[in-house]
Image: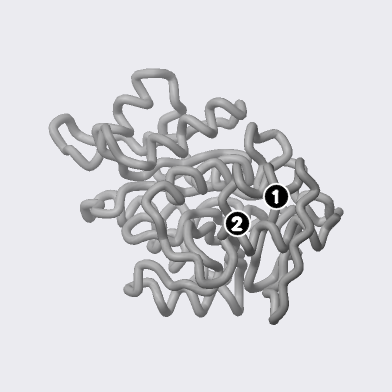
Amino acid sequence: MREQIINAAIKYEGDYEKIAWAIKKNENITLSGRVLPAITILDNEYPESLKQLRYPPFVLFYKGNPEILNQSSISIVGSRNPELYGIEMTKKIVQSCKRSFVIVSGLAKGIDAIAHQEALNTNRKTIGIIGCGIDRIYPMENENIYHDLSKNGLILSEYPAFTPPRKHHFPFRNRIIAALSEKCIVTAATLKSGTMLTVNEALTLGKEVICIPYPIGVSSGEGCNLLISQGASILTNTSDFAMI
């Protein structure tokens, strides 16, 4: 059954509905060739937190150290085009939060990349959840971070090798970021950013959402201010960072 699930994920390039259909119909899929390491929903290593999702990933292909997958973690998420304020706050949060936390993010441009890089710079554990094949580096500007994570952290994807980055993959993968983390920290977000999708997943799962406040009129922080007005926790000074 385990091999069947992995083969279905490979055949259907991680398409959740097609994999579910193949499992339901007990489709016999035989594939040849090298398969990258993977954790299935049937394995003991599979995180219990992901089973709380409405659509838990059937397979997690990975590069790096899977032992950190079940450790306590926080997610740090934000926009792809943050201002200097958001960049600096992201770095300070990573530097100051409890070292026992693994930093989880989406290995995207902007806040995600900054959170991962700062975690690597400070010898903290970090996990990147990507929305394309586990072998794909996207965006290419994060190539160095990708290689560092594959050696000194962990990269996860429900999409097998050679799967291109498709637009709908990224909002769907955000549910994994939210589920893996005990808390979701937002350091920059416009009102219509993909970050808000991650926050919605976190709230659905009952996770605490923590935001950095922004001055009125700064578009890259309007999402943060909206969340605070709706009841999200707020960080008001740098001494709060050590409490995370």
| Three-letter residue code for mark 1 | Phe
Which quadrant of the rendered structure holds the C terminus? top right
Image marks 1 and 2: residues in contact by CB distance under 8 Å: yes
Residue 128 at x, y percent in the picture? 53, 61
Q: Residue at x 24, y 54 (%)?
A: 81
Q: Nearer the viewer, residue 40 or 193?
A: 40
Residue 17 is labelled as none
Q: In the rendered image, which quarter is residue 161 located in?
A: bottom right
Determine which residue is flagged by label 1.
Answer: 58
Q: CA distance from mark 1 to mark 2?
A: 8 Å
Left or right: 105 in relation to 27: left
| Three-letter residue code for mark 2 | Glu
Q: Residue at x 36, y 38 (%)?
A: 212
Q: Residue at x 61, y 47 (%)?
A: 18
**Mark 1: few, some, or many residues within 10 Å (few <14, many ≥20)?**
many
Determine which residue is flagged by label 2.
Answer: 158
215 above or below 93?
above
Residue 143 at x, y percent in the picture? 40, 77
**Mark 2: few, some, or many residues within 10 Å (few <14, many ≥20)?**
many
Residue 244 visible in this rendered orientation of the protein: no
Residue 49 at x, y percent in the picture? 71, 41
Q: Nearer the viewer, residue 81 or 209?
A: 81
